[in-house]
Amino acid sequence: MDLGLRDRVAIVTGGNRGIGYAISAELLKEGAHVAVASLDPARNEDAVETLRAKTNGRVIGVPADLNDAAAVENLFKTVQAEFGRLDILVNNATNVVQGRFFAMGEGDWDRAFDNKLRGAVLFGDTSAGPWYAQLIEAGEDVAGLRDRLLFGPDAA
């Protein structure tokens, strides 16, 4: 199936295992270029090698702590340097304590929410400027873009 992703550039956080790995593989099969971002450099490299061998796609691994603003900025700079732009951001990474849902303590919940929310906020903050510039350069009408993204295509 052609999803129109050929030559699109994606970052997949947590892309070196589980759902993130499956997303990375499918994006590569569709012809997208992928940056796999995760904390573990060795696991990233293993995943990148396997993905490259399976798909012959253009994929890189970028170790990144998504709670660290400097690491997130470095991730975007690496992707920009390697691919020249960013089209897709899959915010998949999380760090949840394994075990019974109702047995999680308050500290576990705080860390899980902090990890997921902080990463999403840092990604949005870091990617917004270059993404807007990329859209403007492509001749896109960005007036009201925020409202359209939040409230749908008919938002004023």
Image (cartoon, rainbow, N blue to C red):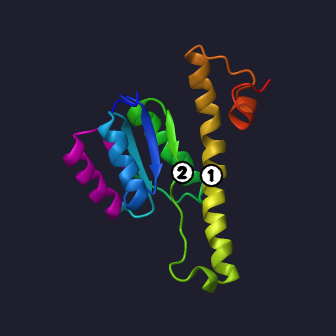
Give x and y (percent) for residue 13. 48, 53
In percent of the image, x 38 and y 42: which residue is there?
34
Q: Are marks 1 and 2 in contact (CB under 8 Å)?
A: yes
Return the residue at label 2. 91
Q: Is residue 137 above or below residue 110?
A: above
Q: Position of residue 82 (x, y in %)?
A: 39, 36
Question: Would residue 98 appear left or right of 151 to someone viewing this image?
Answer: left
Q: Residue at x 55, y 16 (%)?
A: 138
Residue at the extreme top = 139
Task: Specify whether 41 is left or right of 52.
Answer: right
Residue in the image at 32% along x and 63% along y: 42
Q: Is 57 within the magenta?
A: yes
Does residue 126 sit above or below 107 in this rendering? above
Picture coordinates of residue 20 (x, y %)?
42, 55
Distance between the alpha carbons at the discs numbered 1 and 2: 7 Å
Q: Please report the bounds of the magenta region as a residue range.
A: 42-61
Q: Quadrant of residue 154?
A: top right
Is 134 above or below relative to 9? above
The amino acid at mark 1 is: Ala
Q: Amino acid at mark 2?
A: Asn
Give residue 62's mark: none
Residue to which mark 1 is pinned: 120
